[in-house]
């Protein structure tokens, strides 16, 4: 079993299970852990337990975001009939670039930061910003595209 890497020297952190990137299902254990850690963050600010809890909570939130982004990108590749590596590749053909931009946009709509999306899809954050702006502009000016994106968002599970 892999271990969760936490930026802390506290000995208790070595017993936390790690996130398996192949999992696309929400993990109720992580949700419960995050909830418990939020309670610890109310301790006095100088408490070692609070510092540890904040560190672990930050890592749990990163894991949850990675799961959400993985689910979205998996569904985008299925919808566009691409392999998963295509979204992370440097391919610039129209079909792949469009699917990648839609993936950027859907991930952003799910609440992910530009940096998190860029790291997940192995692209520069400026590429993510550009892709999101392109899809935003097209959604604003093209009612048929807005309808397409709305239906795609419903199938993927992202509020559009």
Image (spheres, rainbow, N blue to C red):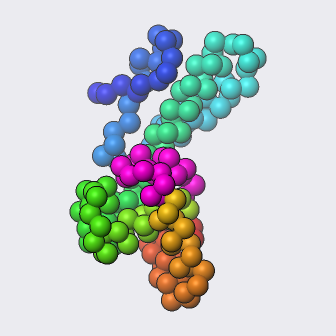
Residue 63 drawn at (x, y percent): 46, 40
Q: Is residue 122 above or below residue 29?
A: below
Query: Quarter of the image containing the N terminus?
Result: top left
Extent of the magenta region = 110-128
Q: Relative to the observer, which residue lies in front, 37 or 66? A: 66
Q: Residue at x 60, y 80 (%)?
A: 140
Residue 135 drawn at (x, y percent): 51, 72
Q: Is residue 88 above or below residue 99?
A: above
Image-based side of 43 in relation to 23, left or right: right
Q: Residue at x 42, y 25 (%)?
A: 5
Q: Quadrant of residue 78?
A: bottom left
Q: Relative to the observer, which residue lies in front, 1 or 159? A: 159
Q: Quadrant of residue 83?
A: bottom left
Q: Residue at x 33, y 39 (%)?
A: 20
Q: Residue at x 30, y 46 (%)?
A: 22
Is residue 37 magenta-colored?
no
């Amino acid at each position: 079993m892999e271990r969760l890497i936490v930026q802390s020297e506290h000995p208790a952190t070595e017993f936390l299970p790690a996130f398996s990137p192949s999992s696309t299902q929400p993990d109720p254990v992580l949700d419960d852990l995050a909830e418990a850690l939020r309670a610890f963050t109310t301790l006095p600010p100088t408490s070692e337990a609070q510092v540890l809890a904040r560190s672990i909570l930050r890592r749990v939130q990163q894991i949850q975001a990675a799961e959400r982004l993985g689910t979205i990108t998996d569904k985008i590749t299925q919808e566009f009939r691409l392999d998963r590596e295509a979204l992370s590749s440097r391919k610039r053909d129209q079909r792949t670039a469009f699917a990648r931009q839609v993936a950027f946009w859907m991930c952003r709509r799910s609440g992910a930061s530009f940096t998190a999306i860029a790291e997940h899809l192995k692209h520069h954050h400026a590429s993510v910003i550009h892709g999101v702006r392109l899809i935003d502009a097209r959604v604003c000016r093209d009612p048929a595209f807005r309808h397409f994106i709305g239906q795609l968002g419903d199938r993927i599970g992202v509020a559009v």
